[in-house]
Image: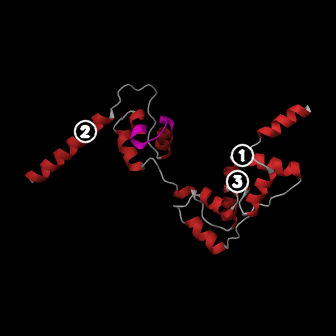
Amino acid sequence: MSDAFIAAHRRRRKFTTEQMMALKAEGLTQKEAARRLGVTQSAIALRLARDGLFWCQPERKVDNATFSRLWRCHSITTEEIATWMGVTRQAVSDRARRSGLPSRVNVRRKLIRETELRDLWMAGVALKDIAAYFGCASTSSVTRAALAAGLPERPLGSVSQTSMDEYREMKLGERMLAASRVETA
């Protein structure tokens, strides 16, 4: 590379080493400093390497009891715990596994409720309508949930499918019939 190119490239930089080191002195992480300077964390790391400097990322020392409470509080995401501790999400998951804490997979919010899916599936409601009802992006997630629930497979290209509106009308009719039977009894 020519000296002119290097000089032009350095003029475009948005921060100086002094600015970067001042943020380090404030106790910020590289990520926080990069955000304040309006550059990427990689830009900070490259500048440190070029200037022969280092910046130890502070890790919060968290005792096992506190970590366990954080892990078991499912309103706090794994990513939030990782950010607070100054480590990666994978490091948090690894620590939980090594500590013998239960997996968070089983407590994830299920988008598709099995009992409602069973009723919609057996009534023949169209997959696209079921997916829209549960807020799923695709029909394949509905199909996977149905198979996991042990529901029978639908034949490919089945034409006789019920719309969600027809299903709701059918359920309303069943409730009205049940209510009239209770009144006459």
Query: Which amino acid is tagged 1?
Result: Thr
Q: Sequence order check: which comes first, mark 1 or mark 2?
A: 1
- 69 or 102, which is in the foreground? 69
Q: Sequence order check: which comes first, mark 1 or mark 3?
A: 3
Residue pointed to by mark 1: 40
Image quadrant containing the N terminus? top right
User: Which element is circle 2 on?
Assistant: helix
Q: Is residue 141 above or below residue 31?
A: above
Please state the horizontal and vertical placement of residue 79, each as a whole percent of the image: 62, 56
User: Which element is circle 1 on?
Assistant: loop
User: Which element is circle 3 on?
Assistant: helix
Query: Which amino acid is tagged 2?
Result: Met
Q: Is residue 134 magenta?
A: yes
Residue pointed to by mark 3: 31
Range covered by the magenta-colored residues: 131-140
Q: How is the image coloured?
A: secondary structure
User: Is the residue under label 2 in contact with that under label 1 (CB below 8 Å)?
Assistant: no
